[in-house]
Structures are given as C-alpha cells and as structure tokens.
Image (tube, rainbow, N blue to C red):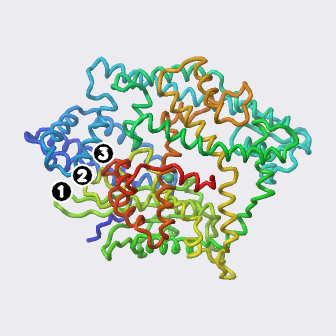
C-alpha cells in the first residue's frame, strides 16, 4: 500500500464528510478524557492522530480552492471554515485537555522522548498564552480585550483603505507622465469630455509608479504627502491598541507585550532582539551614507524623501540595469526544476523520482524523494499561472512524517505552487531570474517539511517551528540561486545551449545588492520602532517621539513633519507582526550565516550542508530553532554574514 494519500477531494460530500469526522473526533475526545490513567500513549498520541487526520482531510480542499478556484470550491470552503474554527476554538478552550497535558508532562517527565516533551510544552504554552488556565474574571477581561483588539485592528485597516481610496491626482499635461513605463501610462489613462487625462492614486502599483518614474517633483511631493499623512484618526487607535496589548501581556504574566510576543518565538529575550537590530544598524550605516552620497551626486538639488525612489531608479538604469527578458531563455522551467533537483541531490545525497499520477491539473506533477535509497517523501508541483489560481507562490504541507500508534512510519508530502509563465505545445515556460529565486525559496520550505525524521506529527517538519525561524530554511536555499556553481548546472540558453556567463551572473548579484544598505536601515527603522513600541505603554506624543528618536539614526534624509508613517503601519496595527517585525531580518541572519558556512567549505563537499540536513531538516519543529542553530554552528548567529550577502563590507 502506498504511504501517501491519493489526491482526492469529493466536493459533493465534503461538508457531510467533514461533519462526520468532527463528530467522530468529538466523541473520541470525550472517550479520551474519561480515561482514568492518562498517559502520553493512551491520551496525547490518539489526540494528535485525530488532529492530523482532520488536517489531512481538509488540506486538499484549501489546496483546490487556491489552485483550481471555482464558485463551488469557494462555497464549500466558506461553509467549511466556520465548522473547523468552531471545533478548534472549543478544543483550545477545553481545560480538561490542558489539565491532562500538565499531569502527563509531570508524571512522565523522566520517560518521555524530547519530541514528546516538545509536543506537550507547545500545547501547554498555547493554552497559557490564551489565558485558558486563569480565573474566570481574568478570562472574561481577556476575552473583552481580544474582541476590542480585533475591532480596532479592523478599524485601522478600514481607515487606511478609505483614505487610500479617497485620494486621486489627475495629470493633464502629457509632459508630466514622460518616462513612465507604457503599461503604467495605459493604466492611468482616461478620457474626460474628449480630453485625455491620467489618474494616479495611493493604491500600490499606481503610487509606486509615479514615485519611481514621475519627473515632476511637485507632483511627487503631493502624492508623497497624501500617502504619508493618510488616516490621522488612526493615531487614537494606536493608543488604544497599545494600552490593550500591554494590559493583556500583564494579565498573562509578562512585563510587556514584546515579552509576550517572544514567548512563542525563537529569539531568547527582548535584549537579544534589540542588540541584534542595533548591531545590524551600526554595521550598515557607513555604507548607507556612501550610497546616499552616490545618489545625491546625480540629483540637482538636496534629496528629500519623495525624491529617493526616482533617483534610485535613474541610478539603477545607469549602472545596474538588468533586462529580465535577456535572462529568460536561460531559465526554461523544466530545466530549472531538474537542475534544482540535481543541486539538492548533490548537496544532501537525496534522489528525486517522477511519479505518474492523475492530479488536479495536467500541468501539476509529483516526485518521490529518496534518502539513502529509502522512500522518504512526496512533493507536488503546480508551477504555472492560470485563471483559476490564486496569485503568488507558496508551500503547503499536507502529510507529516511521524510514527503512528501502531508503530508504523508515515511519510510526509507537500505542495509547491507558483505562478510562472504558462507553457503550451509550441511555447516553453521561460522564467525570470526572480522566479528561479522564488522556486528555490519555496523548495527550502518544502524540504524542511519533507525531510523530517520526527516521530510526532505535531512537531514534525514545519509543524511547531517558531514564527521567527520559519523563513530560515527558505532563505537559506534561495541564496543558492545566485551562486555560479549552482546556476551553471541548469542555466542553459534554450536555443544556443550556451551556459549563463559569469558576467551575467555578476550583474544579477550587483542588481540584487543595489543600494542594499539603505534598504536594510529602512527595514531596521520599522523593526526598531515596532519592537521598542511594545516595551512599555507608549501613548499620544510619545509614539511620535519614539519614532523621531529612532530616525535620528536610521533616517539619513529627515522626513517632513507631516510624515505620520505609523498611521499606515498595518503590519503591526492590523496584521500579525506586532513586536515581530524584526523576524524578517532575524531569519535572514540565520540563513546567510549558514549559507556562507556551506559556500566557504565548498558547496558540494561541505560538512555544514550534511549537518544542516541532520540537524535543521531532520529535526523540524522538535526543538527550539535557537537550540538547533547553536548545535549546527557551535555558536550563536552572527550578523556579519548577512552584511556580506548584501555586499556590505
Ligand atoms: Zn517563505
């Protein structure tokens, strides 16, 4: 029998099947809770397996809804979501389960494997971070706070959206749109009583287009001013949100919200995050000054915030312009995919083998992965854009490696989905270099899940990996898409068979690193502001003052006083990044550090690559990434290699 589930999803019976499964689980949970002597084997494991089965049942639907979206998948998905949410909410609030976990963790402290302890630890932590274990009065207050927080976050987004949509700038003079790409001009163009005009808005492609290519400085300033002063009413929401977050953190036993945020992350403590950010900043500043100086040289006036995108583009055109089209013939999709396999086979001594299966689309394909000649995992690719597919690229894990309650090994599977140029009978799919990077990135996530040796599904592969460490394996792999010895495996011109030259590879790297220090300090400004803002309850003017203090260092061009960037910082006020924005850079540091260890040892003979497989990939979420990283490198992460990766000396 195949260790992999066949890909199927019966849409007609899905909701009924889901309800049956949940009813079965609820009954099962009741039976488990009635057990007298609860142990890991008779309580935790069966519960874990029930959860896993539900997840395995649900994943094909969410996958189909993303890659073969139709009215029917949407309807069923919309019906299924509240059923699943209700079930998991009940589960996460079931104190009897929490008590059982605590008891088992205590009773079996000496006999459980470290993987089993991690499962208990993470489950107990989940309960405690939601306050499920606290007294009724505190719990009621926490519920109020949560409700209020989500209302405020919603309001924050709504205000931002309204302000974004309310603004437009109409250009009537053709001179003012000179230099913009034709596609942007077409998008902005409209007829008004027989006169051709151009509309620019604060929506993303439109705003960026004018700021990057628009020659008229007055218009750039207008647009910029409108953009950075959106939604002034969000100032009050920020105050309320910060107060509620602080109160919540304290009710849960933390000093501040930053500490609460770190409880479920890899970063050991607030000080480690702050010194990491400061360290990167100190080391990037001098090059950032140089970069700004170069930029200033080509501008006829002192640069302001609304000039930088425009002059950056000019400088880029002059110095590092890359014609993506010139690269495409070197990156035929199947060549790239097979080349990536060859690279991974050499790096980790694994094997990919195509399997012929009937899948959801004729363009989708499946491969089995072998490690030491033993079947290890299955991966599905669906790489080409089509109308019924959601945009972007992602990895979606399906089955997880584990040992079931009968001692039988279960193998992992996952989907890699991208939106590359479609192929046809007459046209191959030719990728941009950016697409190659994307494929390597998603593959990094996929093998993190697939090569797991962990026996407990809840902490196997990407399951249980801390939020600030999730992008480490993906960024690690993506870095190889710029390495000559890797690119030369597959970057072969489709007509001439010529291998991509060192010159062309060099241009890719230079273009990636163009004004990189300025980019880094901008990210650091956001990260420092976000993190420091959650160290104590800032309110009113204090928020702006904090930002100003940070900007004294990070903002090489002082933004005008009407700049109220914070009122549009949706990542942290309306998204999941509060006291977590640092994660972007954090994971980049881990990946750059490991990447250069492998490169410096000689990619295909690198002991670090083997250790990366054995420690990071095999162990998945079964230990904190902080421990795994130190085991891998025999030291703490070092920020220097990220600077090197960005061409900063
Ligand atoms: Zn990613």
Left or right: residue 64 compared with residue 333: left
Q: CA distance from mark 2 to mark 1?
A: 8 Å
Query: Between disc 1 and disc 3, whose residue precedes?
Result: 3
Residue linked to disc 3: 19
Q: Which mark is residue 278?
A: none
Nearer to the camera, 353 or 562: 562
Query: Between disc 2 and disc 1, whose residue precedes?
Result: 2
Determine contact: label 2, label 1, CB under 8 Å. yes
> How dense is the environment of label 1, judged by Cα within 10 Å: few (below 14), some, or many (20 and up)?
few
Q: CA distance from mark 1 to mark 3?
A: 24 Å
Mark 2 or 3, closer to the camera? 2
Query: Would you place residue 87 above or below residue 431 in this image?
Result: above
Ligand 1 contact, mark 1 (Cβ < 8 Å): no
Ligand 1 contact, mark 2 (Cβ < 8 Å): no
The residue at 58%/55% (across/down) is: 644
Query: Would you place residue 565 above or below residue 582 in this image?
Result: above
Query: Would you place residue 131 above or below residue 110 in this image?
Result: above
Circle 1 SS class: loop
> How dense is the environment of label 2, judged by Cα within 10 Å: few (below 14), some, or many (20 and up)?
some
Q: CA distance from mark 2 to mark 3?
A: 17 Å
The residue at 83%/46% (across/down) is: 297
Q: Which mark is residue 49?
A: 2
Circle 2 SS class: helix
Residue linked to disc 1: 405
Q: Position of residue 290 (x, y in %)?
A: 72, 46
Name the quadrant containing residue 25: top left
Left or right: residue 539 compared with residue 50: right
Name the quadrant containing residue 30: top left
């Amino acid at each position: 029998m195949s260790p992999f589930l066949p890909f199927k999803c019966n849409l007609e019976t899905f909701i009924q099947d889901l309800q049956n499964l949940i009813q079965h689980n609820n009954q099962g949970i009741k039976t488990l809770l009635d057990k007298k002597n609860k142990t890991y084997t008779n309580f935790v494991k069966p519960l874990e397996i029930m959860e896993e089965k539900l997840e395995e049942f649900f994943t094909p639907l969410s996958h189909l809804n993303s890659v073969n979206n139709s009215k029917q998948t949407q309807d069923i998905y919309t019906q299924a979501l509240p059923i699943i949410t209700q079930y998991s909410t009940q589960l996460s609030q079931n104190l009897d389960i929490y008590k059982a976990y605590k008891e088992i963790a205590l009773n079996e402290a000496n006999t459980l494997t470290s993987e089993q302890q991690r499962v208990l630890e993470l489950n107990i932590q989940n309960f405690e971070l939601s306050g499920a274990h606290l007294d009724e009065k505190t719990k009621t207050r926490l519920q109020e706070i949560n409700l209020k927080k989500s209302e405020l976050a919603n309001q924050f987004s709504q205000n931002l959206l309204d302000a974004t949509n309310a603004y437009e700038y109409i250009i009537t003079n053709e001179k003012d749109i000179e230099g913009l790409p034709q596609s942007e001009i077409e998008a902005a163009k409209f007829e008004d009583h027989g006169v051709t005009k151009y509309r620019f808005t604060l929506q993303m492609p439109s705003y960026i287009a004018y700021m990057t290519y628009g020659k008229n400085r007055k218009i750039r300033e207008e647009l910029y001013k409108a953009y950075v002063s959106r939604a002034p009413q969000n100032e009050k929401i920020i105050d309320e949100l910060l107060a509620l977050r602080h109160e919540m953190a304290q009710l849960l036993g933390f000093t501040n919200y930053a500490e609460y945020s770190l409880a479920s992350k890899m970063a050991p403590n607030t000080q480690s995050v702050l010194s990491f950010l400061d360290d990167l900043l100190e080391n990037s500043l001098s090059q950032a000054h140089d970069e700004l100086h170069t930029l200033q040289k080509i501008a006829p006036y002192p640069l302001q915030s609304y000039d930088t995108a425009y002059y950056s583009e000019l400088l880029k055109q002059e110095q590092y312009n890359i014609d993506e089209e010139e690269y495409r013939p070197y990156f035929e999709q199947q060549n790239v995919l097979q080349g990536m396999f060859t690279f991974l086979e050499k790096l980790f001594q694994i094997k990919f083998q195509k399997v012929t299966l009937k899948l959801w689309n004729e363009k989708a394909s499946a491969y089995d992965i072998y490690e030491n000649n033993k079947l290890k995992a299955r991966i599905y690719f669906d790489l080409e854009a089509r109308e019924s597919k959601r945009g972007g690229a992602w990895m979606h894990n399906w089955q997880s490696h584990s040992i079931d309650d009968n001692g039988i090994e279960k193998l992992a599977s996952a989907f890699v989905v991208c939106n590359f140029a479609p192929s046809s009978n007459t046209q191959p799919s030719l990728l941009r270099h950016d697409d190659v990077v994307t494929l390597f990135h998603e593959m990094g996530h996929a093998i993190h899940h697939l090569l797991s040796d962990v026996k407990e599904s809840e902490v196997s592969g990407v399951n249980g990996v801390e939020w600030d460490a999730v992008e480490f394996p993906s960024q690690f792999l993506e870095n190889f898409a710029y390495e000559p010895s890797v690119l030369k495996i597959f970057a072969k011109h489709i007509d001439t068979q010529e291998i991509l030259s060192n010159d062309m590879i060099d241009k890719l790297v230079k273009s990636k690193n163009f004004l990189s220090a300025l980019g880094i300090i901008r990210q650091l400004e956001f990260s420092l502001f976000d993190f420091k803002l959650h160290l104590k309850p800032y309110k009113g003017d204090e928020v702006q003052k904090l930002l100003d203090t940070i900007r004294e260092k990070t903002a090489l061009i002082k933004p005008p006083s009407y700049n109220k960037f914070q009122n549009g910082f949706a990542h942290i006020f309306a998204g999941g990044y509060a006291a977590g924005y640092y994660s972007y850079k954090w994971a980049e540091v881990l990946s750059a550090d490991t990447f250069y260890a492998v490169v410096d040892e000689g990619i295909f003979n690198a002991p670090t690559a083997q250790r990366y497989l054995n420690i990071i990939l095999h162990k998945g979420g079964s230990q904190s990434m902080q421990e795994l990283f130190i085991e891998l490198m025999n030291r703490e992460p070092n920020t220097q290699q990220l600077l090197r990766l960005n061409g900063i000396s």
